[in-house]
Image (cartoon, helix red, strand yellow):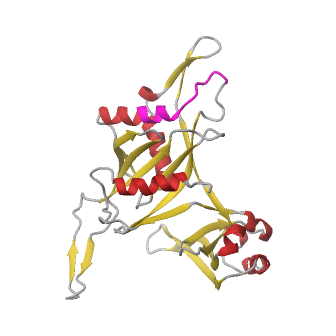
């Protein structure tokens, strides 16, 4: 899968590092330094590669640096489940195909920035450059894997003096930006999308049934500014529409898209209640662009121009 060379999306989130929820009172506290120690330890031991997806994917980090206010790292992923690529010559209109060999895969990399100072809830701001395979869930899974080793656990004594080991648990939630009500005040309501999934069981030619996932989609296009009352009127029609939509209300996902004045389109999944929709918020995603040197699929080293733009986003979170 190709990635754009002239811009990147940056997802803004909150990283929590904690014990398991049923941890006893004597359990030790975990901090950002524990994650850094685990990543650095795996790099030093050359044990930084995590295999997953039935051995079709690899994820690793071998570049991590501590700054005054941030930890920055490059997370990389290899994915066998990609095809070769085709390039079109825009003058001759000829196509050049590059085939992928059997044991090759796509190679992508992303910058990640983590704020060193936690907020009042103990969470650290985290910014993730979005490329194929690297997103909130995969980053969380990789951090958990990095610390899932006896070398990076913490040992303490329980109330009876017996040694007990604990390891860090990670949570990453998207940082909530404007509510839908706030976005509608200056933005354009693009559309509302309905998506339901169901399994279609059909008899195959052999003894085993073939199971196919069937996706049903519908879209209401608006593409104009609407008042709060007009938007609420649109949202109130969800119930009647979903009664006859494939899957019904319980199995249908609803997405609202609003286009901001700067051209950025924000997309949020919403619940069905019309009044609550206006109070629901978007996960903050910011676009960075205007790079003098094109952005590659992967990085040999940190890109200072990209990091400058990511730090600027971090400085303006909540503003």
Total marks placed: 0
Residue 259 at x, y percent in the picture: 59, 75
Which residue is located at x 46 percent, y 36 percent?
Answer: 35
- Viewer can see residue 57: no
Left or right of 287: which side holds 91? left
Q: Residue at x 41, y 67 (%)?
A: 289
Question: Image height check: is 250 above or below 170?
Answer: below
The image shows residue 41 at horizontal and vertical percentages of 36, 31
Q: Which residues are magenta?
A: 25-37
Dividing the picture into quarters, in which one does residue 267 lie?
Answer: bottom right
In percent of width and height, residue 130 lies at 44, 59
In the rendered image, residue 112, in percent from the top left (x then y), is placed at 43, 50
Q: Nearer the viewer, residue 159 or 270?
A: 270
Q: Is residue 285 magenta?
A: no
Residue with the most extreme top position:
161
Q: Is residue 263 visible?
A: yes
Queried whether the magenta region covers residue 29, the answer comes back as yes
Q: Quadrant of the N terminus?
A: bottom left
The residue at 37%/40% (across/down) is 65
């Amino acid at each position: 899968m190709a990635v754009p060379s002239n811009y990147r999306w940056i997802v803004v989130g909150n990283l929590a590092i904690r014990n398991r929820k049923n941890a006893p009172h004597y359990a030790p506290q975990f901090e950002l330094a524990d994650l850094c120690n685990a990543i650095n330890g795996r790099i030093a031991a050359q044990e930084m590669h995590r295999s997953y997806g039935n051995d079709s994917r690899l994820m690793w980090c071998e570049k991590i640096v501590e700054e005054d206010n941030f930890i920055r790292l490059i997370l990389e992923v290899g994915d066998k489940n990609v095809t070769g690529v085709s390039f079109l010559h825009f003058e001759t209109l000829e196509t050049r195909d590059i085939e992928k060999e059997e044991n090759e895969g796509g190679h992508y990399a992303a910058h990640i920035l983590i704020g060193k100072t936690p907020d009042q809830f103990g969470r650290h701001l985290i910014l993730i450059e979005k490329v194929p395979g690297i997103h909130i869930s995969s980053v969380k899974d990789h951090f958990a894997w990095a610390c899932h080793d006896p070398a990076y656990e913490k040992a303490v004594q329980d109330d009876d003096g017996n040694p007990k080991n604990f390891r860090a648990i990670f949570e990453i939630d998207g940082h909530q930006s404007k509510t839908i009500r706030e976005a509608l005040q200056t933005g354009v309501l693009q559309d509302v999308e309905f998506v339901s999934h169901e399994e279609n069981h059909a008899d195959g030619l052999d003894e085993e049934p073939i199971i196919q996932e069937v996706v049903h989609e519908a879209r209401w296009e608006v593409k104009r500014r609407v008042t709060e009352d007009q938007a609420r009127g649109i949202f109130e029609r969800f119930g009647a529409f979903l009664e006859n939509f494939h899957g019904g209300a319980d199995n249908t996902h609803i997405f609202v898209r609003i286009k901001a004045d700067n051209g950025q389109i924000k997309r949020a999944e919403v619940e069905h209640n019309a009044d609550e929709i206006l109070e629901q918020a978007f996960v903050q995603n910011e676009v960075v662009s205007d790079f003098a040197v094109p952005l590659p699929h992967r990085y040999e080293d940190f890109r200072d121009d990209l990091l400058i733009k990511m730090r600027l986003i971090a400085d303006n979170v909540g503003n």
